[in-house]
Amino acid sequence: MSIDIGIIGLAKCGKTTIFNALTKGKADTRSSAPHIGIAKVPEPRLKVLADMLHPQRVVPAEMSYIDIGASVKDLGEDRGIGSQILNQLSNADALINVARAFTDESIPHMEGSLDIERDITTANLELALYDTGIIGRRLERIEISLKGAKATERQGLLREQELLTKLKANLEKEVPIRQLRLPTDEARTIANFQFLTAKPQLIVVNIGEEQIPQAASLEAELNSRYAGTKSGIITLCGKLEMELAELDNEAAAGFRAEFGIAEPGLNRVIKLSYELLGLISFFSIASDEVKAWFIPKDTTALKAAGKIHSDMERGFIRAEIISYHDMVKCGTLAEAHKKGLLRLEGKSYLVQDGDVITFLFNV
Ligand SMILES: Nc1nc2c(ncn2[C@@H]2O[C@H](COP(=O)(O)OP(=O)(O)OP(=O)(O)O)[C@@H](O)[C@H]2O)c(=O)[nH]1
Ligand SMILES: [Mg+2]
């Protein structure tokens, strides 16, 4: 299972620019075509492990990004966003909502003027309208089904009707589903609808280079308004990040220092998006390979093995685990053995962020 993130926003807000920055892609920003690409997730701990263990292959975790290639205002209309991209967006695990903050007279703002908060609201209204449409159609079907329903089916239908009516009422008050903290059974009932407002959302405020000195204060100000349940906000200079993504790491770091950017913006975007998703990282070591993986918090060792290969889950025997910090302290696996820091854990062990794992399995 890969992690997919949809990039949405109004026209010309910088979606493709940010997509290119994230995926080190070369998609043409002059065309409004949709794009799908993979980002290798920056993970400093993976490099440290690689330097210690000298494996032949070092494989970072990946995330896939979908640039919808249209204004989010076209969501409801067939002509705007093709059904294939709409499907991908519905399948996405989280959304990045890009809001334009950069000024450039040669690129007219589609809404007539620059207004970050209005654009964020507009995009969210579009998502809400889209979800409301799905709910409306389902409620109509439920009405029809209820007419001929047996007593046993009635109960389930009535419960679903009540839940969907509650969601609809919230959406009409501009409360997105992601903010509702639904109990697990309700969340499960609606999972199949793939509601867009239920997805964790990271707002990326796309600033111009000249705004970089104010980036942190702007971010803090917007944070108090927009950060909340399953949502976060960040400022990023998309254009600069896209250009830096084309350079090698050393040259990029040099430019960042010049601009006073402490941490690469992209690392922050990726880190925040996986925090919003409630993901943690673990590292697998096997046959001369060290790999980084994402899993949801509270995943068992058995399921973590399954993420790597279904055979590993089926034939799971146990997992040999050391925390990242212990591994760094020991320097080598042999030393870790000697110090007794390698633990043997069973199927139900809950994998912790930073665990370095060798799975023992039998097929
Ligand atoms: N000056 C400046 N221009 C930018 C910045 N970010 C993006 N642009 C430019 O704005 C234009 C639109 O950017 P895109 O990334 O194509 O925006 P988009 O949202 O993908 O646009 P559509 O797909 O056409 O809706 C491009 O010409 C970019 O080069 C920025 O931070 N500063
Ligand atoms: Mg584009």
Image (cartoon, helix red, strand yellow):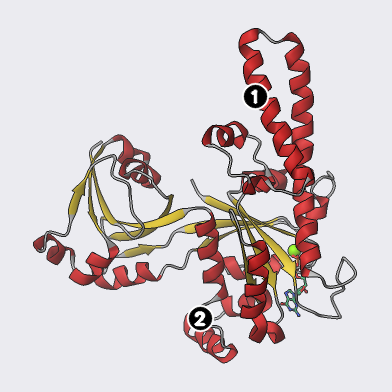
The residue most toward the bottom is 258
Asked if residue 331 can be seen in this view, the reply is no
Q: Quadrant of residue 70?
A: bottom right
* Camera-side residue of 178 and 317: 178
Say which element carries label 1: helix
Q: For mark 1, does the 10 Å Cα neighbourhood hold few (<14), some (14 to 19), or many (20 or more) residues? A: few
Who's the residue at 77% across and 69% down the image?
A: 116
Asked which secondary structure carries label 2, the reply is loop
For ligand 1, the image quadrant comes to bottom right
Residue beneath disc 2: 248
Which residue is the site of mark 1? 159
Identify the mark at residue 226; answer none if there is no mark: none
The crowd level at tag 2 (other Cα within 10 Å; few <14, some 14-19, many 20+) is: few
Q: Establish if 67 lies above or below 164.
A: below
**Which part of the image, by quadrant, shows the C terminus?**
top left
- Under mark 2, the amino acid is Asp
Of residues 10 and 217, the one nearer the viewer is 217
- Residue 134: percent from left, percent from top: 75, 36
Left or right, 342 with respect to 86, comes to left
Tell me the residue at 75%/61% (across/down).
120
Amino acid identity at mark 1: Arg
